[in-house]
């Protein structure tokens, strides 16, 4: 994914969280569109098994975990997947 597309996707995702916090959209709608954004940005879909969190906390957690995983996938070909933290 191009960097500009990722910035746009994250911006839309944060706006979705903001709308949810203000009560402008329902959690179910936020989950639906957040899942689509995750997939569009090259991340796995939402981990809906974690719905015990409050909706805003859930979406923030999913975004940060998704971005961390996307970063790992992006850096893996550069640094190789055989290295562990203790080897570096």
Image (spheres, helix red, strand yellow):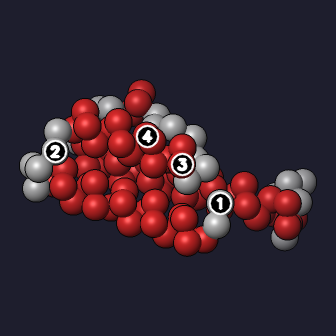
Q: CA distance from mark 2 to mark 3?
A: 21 Å
Q: Residue at (85%, 66%) from the top-left corner? A: 79
Q: CA distance from mark 2 to mark 4?
A: 15 Å
Q: Are marks 4 and 3 in contact (CB under 8 Å)?
A: no
Q: CA distance from mark 4 to mark 1?
A: 17 Å
Which residue is at the far left?
23
Please name the residue that numbered disc 1 is placed on: 1
Q: Secondary structure at mark 4?
A: helix
Q: Secondary structure at mark 3?
A: helix
Nearest to N terminus: mark 1 or mark 2: 1
Nearest to N terminus: mark 4 or mark 1: 1
Residue 15 against residue 46 in the figure, above or below: below
Q: Tag on residue 40?
A: 3
- Percent across and percent down for residue 73 are 72, 55
Nearest to N terminus: mark 2 or mark 4: 2
Q: Is residue 61 left or right of residue 7?
A: left
Q: Tag on residue 25?
A: 2
- Percent across and percent down for residue 59 are 34, 48
Please name the residue that numbered disc 4 is placed on: 35
Mark 4 is surrounded, within 10 Å at the Cα level, by few (under 14), some (14 to 19) or many (20 or more) other residues, namely many
Nearest to N terminus: mark 2 or mark 3: 2
Query: Of circles 4 and 3, which is in front?
Result: 3
Q: Are marks 4 and 1 in contact (CB under 8 Å)?
A: no
Q: Is residue 85 left or right of residue 6?
A: right
Q: Are marks 3 and 1 in contact (CB under 8 Å)?
A: no
Mark 3 is surrounded, within 10 Å at the Cα level, by few (under 14), some (14 to 19) or many (20 or more) other residues, namely some
Q: Residue at (28%, 61%) from the top-left corner? A: 15
Nearest to N terminus: mark 3 or mark 1: 1
Front residue of 32/87: it is 32
Nearest to N terminus: mark 4 or mark 3: 4
Task: Tell me where residue 29 sits by quadrant.
Answer: top left
- Percent across and percent down for residue 35 are 43, 40
């Amino acid at each position: 994914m191009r960097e500009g597309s990722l910035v746009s996707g994250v911006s839309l995702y944060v706006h979705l969280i903001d709308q949810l916090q203000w009560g402008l959209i329902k959690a179910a709608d936020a989950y639906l569109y957040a899942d689509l954004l995750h997939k569009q940005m090259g991340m796995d879909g939402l981990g809906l098994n974690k719905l015990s969190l409050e909706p805003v906390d859930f979406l923030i957690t999913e975004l940060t975990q998704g971005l961390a995983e996307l970063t790992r996938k992006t850096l893996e070909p550069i640094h190789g997947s055989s290295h562990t933290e203790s080897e570096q």
